[in-house]
Image (tube, helix red, strand yellow):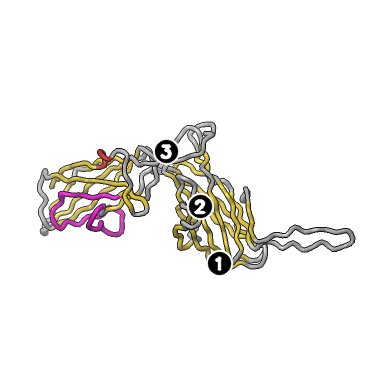
Amino acid sequence: MIRVSRVIAVGGAVAALTLAGAAPAVADQPSLSVGTGTAVLTPAAGGGYAGQLAVRIRATGGDVSGVSVTIVQPAGLRFAGERNGQLHTCVPAPAVAPRALECYLPVTIAAGRHHDLSITLTSLAGPQRRSRFSEEGAVTVGSGSATATARFRALLVGTGPGVDPAPYRPATEPDLAVTAGPAAFVDNGDGTWSGRLPVTLNAATDAEHDEVGLTVTGLPAGSGVKVEGQPIGCMYGEWACRLDAVAQGARRTSTLLVWTTEPPLTGSPLTVAVVPVRALQPVADVNPVDNTTTTTVTIS
């Protein structure tokens, strides 16, 4: 059962009026209504927070086919899909709000029936003793000319008792640090060499970023690079490799896989540089000195 919080339905509801000796008027119900609960986020494996926002969409008039779902994300929270993959083609909707996303829900809801969603929200916030409520967000649903909006907050569950009276707001500037190496290469015996280069990232703040751009310089000419676990290799150019965003206080290690037909030199230096990226653009780091590190090549 979803506990519905504040619900606003738009569509021209007309209150019924009963007169003595006359039959009551028929209410003109809106076509849609939507309700939400509180999104409860708990600490996630690997850092940050994750949780679900329950959403119930009801067809209060006739049948409804094809529903737009617009989510206004509270500061510091990020939409991470619908748990069962029901929302399609989610794109930014800056005309609605700076942090809005508009998605499509390809379902038909019969008159008087409802449809439930479970929206995943994440945050790069670090753990805190007292729980924190986010600023207000919103979910707006629409079909044709009918729309309805429900507002919600998220609760970031703390490690101890009490609730912080101030709403949660993330830092404005990221603060990443990187360490790397050594780069261990193996002679494959067929004129090629392969290497593994561990890269560790730390984040001192919870400033929002989508991913982390990474470059390696000093590799033999023509080397290929891939992040272990990613389906395609890194591209050439600035910030060629992309790593997942890092939550405040988290420590995340990724391994770069390198292959080359040119022999690497033992002891030669490699430089690894990282930058936080948001909306495909680099974001200035508050302390860029530790965004670059140097390591050396070993061969076995």
Residue drawn at (54%, 32%), measured in percent from left and top? 162
Task: Name the residue tied to disc 3.
Answer: 126
Task: Name the residue tied to disc 2.
Answer: 72
Residue drawn at (59%, 52%), measured in percent from left and top? 150
Nearest to the observer: residue 197 or residue 126:
126
Does the magenta stretch mainly form a helix, a strand or a loop? loop
Between disc 3 and disc 1, whose residue precedes?
1
Relative horizontal placement of residue 35, taking residue 20 as reference (left or right): left
Callout 2: few (<14), some (14-19), or many (20+) C-alpha neighbours within 10 Å? many
Whole-percent x and y of residue 160?
A: 50, 32
Question: Is there a contact, CB below 8 Å, between mark 2 and mark 1?
Answer: no
Callout 1: few (<14), some (14-19), or many (20+) C-alpha neighbours within 10 Å? some
Residue drawn at (46%, 52%), measured in percent from left and top? 98
Helix, strand or loop at mark 1: strand
Helix, strand or loop at mark 3: loop
User: From which residue to which does the magenta span run?
Assistant: 213-238
Marks 2 and 3, how far apart at CA: 22 Å
Between disc 2 and disc 1, whose residue precedes?
1
Q: Mark 3 is on which residue type?
A: Gly
